[in-house]
Image: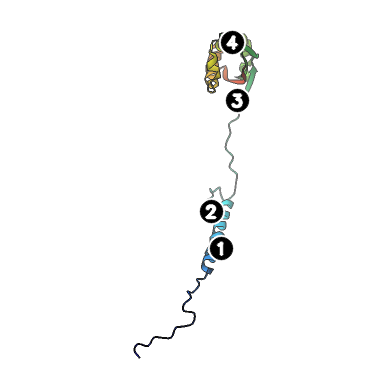
Amino acid sequence: MADAKPAPEEGAGEPKKKSKLPLLLGAVLAVVLGGGSFFAVWSGMILAPSAGGEHAAAEPEVEPMAETEFVALTPMVLSVGAESRRHLRFTASVEVGAARREEVEHLMPRILDVLNSYLRAVDARDLEDPTALVRLRSQMLRRVQVVTGEGRVRDLLITEFVLS
């Protein structure tokens, strides 16, 4: 009887199914904790800058704008290139301080002359380059500032630059 084998139990051939309850509980717990953490941070209960216990909206301090006026330049149409078949339509404004407006308006013929002379001297191939406008703008602003004197003109705003 030493060789007697125990009788096989019923259902021993089938593996026991694992319960999906722990996986389901883990997923539900993760969603609840994630949502609770999001709400705590979003509402400012945690990780919020302390403002004396109050939820005050911090507005950045903005300096008041200096009094600025814009003086429109007379629109110009220039022939470009040696053959003069192409034309440049140019319109701009200069940004000046309110106290300097009359001085800049008085110098307008000189400003138009220096811009006209500069734009006629520029090669047509340079005007077709997409990055040329930035370079041309800085060159024109510098020339306008030389004509008007330091501190009168703050910026040159190009409103129309069409090569046809």
**Residue 6 occupies quadrant:** bottom left
Whichever of callouts 4 and 2 sits on the residue coming sooner in the sequence is 2
Observer able to see residue 141: no
Q: Is residue 146 above or below residue 1?
A: above
Q: Is residue 68 above or below residue 81?
A: below
Q: Which residue is mark 1?
A: 28
Instruction: Name the image quarter holding the N terminus.
Output: bottom left
**Residue 124 or residue 122, whichever sits in front:** 124
Q: Nearer the viewer, mark 1 or mark 2?
A: 1
Q: Position of residue 43 (x, y in %)?
A: 59, 52
Q: Position of residue 102 (x, y in %)?
A: 64, 14
Instruction: Name the image quarter holding the C terminus.
Output: top right
Q: Is residue 21 above or below residue 82?
A: below
Tell me the number on the disc at residue 66: 3
Tell me the number on the disc at residue 116: 4
CA–CA distance between discs 2 and 3? 41 Å
Whichever of callouts 3 and 1 sits on the residue coming sooner in the sequence is 1
Q: Are marks 2 and 3 in contact (CB under 8 Å)?
A: no
* Residue at the extreme bottom of the image, as rendered: 1
Secondary structure of residue under mark 1? helix
Q: Which residue is mark 2?
A: 46
Q: Amino acid type of disc 1?
A: Val
Whichever of callouts 4 and 3 sits on the residue coming sooner in the sequence is 3
CA–CA distance between discs 3 and 1? 58 Å
Numbered label tally: 4
Residue at 52 percent of width and 71 percent of height: 19
